[in-house]
Image: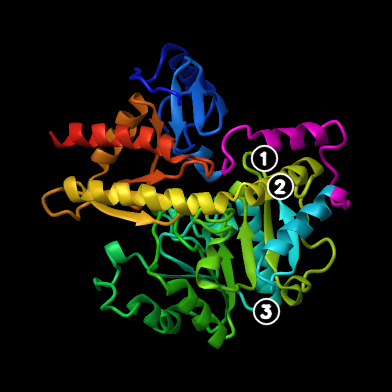
Amino acid sequence: MEKLVFRTIPGPKSAEIIEKSRQCEPPCSVDQTPIVWDHGQGVWVWDVDGNLYIDFTSGVLVSNLGHNHPELVFAIQNQAPRMMNCYSFPTPERVAAAYRLKDMLPSNLDRVFMLSTGADATEAALRIARRYSGKQEILGFYGGFHGRTYGAMGVAGSMSTRRHFGVPVPGGIMAPYGYCYRCFYGKTYPDCDMYCLKMLDRVIESTSSGDLGAVIVEPYQGTAGFVFPPEGWLKSLEDWARVRNVLLIIDEVQAGFGRTGKMFAIEWEDVHPQLLCLGKGMGSGIPASAVCGESKVMECMKPGELSSTWGGNPLASAAVLAVLNTMENQKLPENSRIMGEYLKARFMEMKSRFPFIGDVRGKGLVLGIEFVNPTDQFTPLPEITHKVVMGCAEHGVLLGKLGLYGNVIRIAPPLIITQAELDVALDVFEGVFNALSS
């Protein structure tokens, strides 16, 4: 087991590279811990100063297999000398990856269109939905995030993607998500009987022009702070959509590929969307995404109306095959579920001792820890979040921060993590929380 020691952040080499970055790169990317990554192996990352960290970000929910998994590295090395890109022409690798993925999906999703990024997938899904339904309006949710492209922005409720960018693509309708800790309607679950879903018809009646064709939703909201709706919420939304003949688009770009403890998050409630967006962990470090759908829906698009320069390229497709085979052979979704239960139980116990922890939520290896004013245990306290992120990094645990108020840390280690490795990180959390409470 690797040992973690205190380190000053940033180290001298990291500081030098960060300063060079400031001189040539715009400051528009996500604000991260000020270190410069050098290399990684498994759940471990080294910076350019030689400091060791345990990665609780999975490279922002991408490296589900961990860093440089040997099966993935072998697949990439084997494919690279043969062919890396092949615009729109079928290749054995692309077709094999599509078939392999299709066999893992709910049976109604029998078509797979390979792309490169999560935003690619959601953009394609929006175009397909509008073409198939013949309607222009799409329902999204407050706090939702579906990519940083303009079409995705129009159906997202994320302030970071909507503010100060002008009028989004028309047709987006917004409604409150099932964020029980901060209910938009001031209700309390389960007494509310999912009041936010009961209000959907009122939202549509008040804001729609009568042209609603689809609803797009995340199984859990990532950017909003790893917000998980109550059990049964997503299935009830599916029922609502089917009764009203509205296409259901599930955005699993973050949630898919074992992250929540099942291969796909929709499996938890046996949800069957007409379109499913996948990405991030699909390539475990290699850019790969897909929009999967029912044939009757996907076939509304004529040849050439969906294409991608890099989508489904042989290198990425070989990586996808390696990811899917490794996940199945090593039972990584199951490990995610088991390790996630252990991790959540430990954080729930900490919540009982540290009053600045307002909420612990999640499933599998994706948890959100929300920090609040310890007096009222509700008012967002982003300054604590910053101290936790920096304190953990100084002791060797890398975290991300997010949330509508900037007061949530995201816990998302690679799915290969062991309980012993979790305990190393949890000891760091204990120490940082104790220091904050003293």
Please tell me which residue lies in front, 375 or 126.
375
Answer with left or right where residue 319 lies relative to residue 37.
right
Q: Secondary structure at mark 1?
A: loop
Q: Mark 2 or mark 1: which comes first in sequence? A: 1
Q: Residue at (42%, 33%) from the top-left corner?
A: 32
Residue 74 falls in which quadrant of the image?
top right
Answer with left or right where residue 189 lies relative to residue 423.
left
Residues under numbered marks 2 and 1 in contact, where contact means CB atoms less than 8 Å apart: yes
Which numbered circle lies on residue 320?
Answer: 2
Please tell me which residue lies in front, 150 or 327.
327
Instruction: Please name the predominant secondary structure of the magenta segment in the image.
Output: loop
Can you give x and y, in whole percent of width and height, for residue 4 in the image?
Answer: 38, 23
Answer with left or right where residue 406 lies relative to residue 129.
left
Q: Which residue is mark 1?
A: 286
- The CA distance from mark 2 to mark 3 is 33 Å
Residues under numbered marks 3 and 1 in contact, where contact means CB atoms less than 8 Å apart: no
Q: Secondary structure at mark 2?
A: helix
Q: Amino acid at mark 2?
A: Val
Can you give x and y, in whole percent of width and height, for residue 299 in the image?
Answer: 79, 72
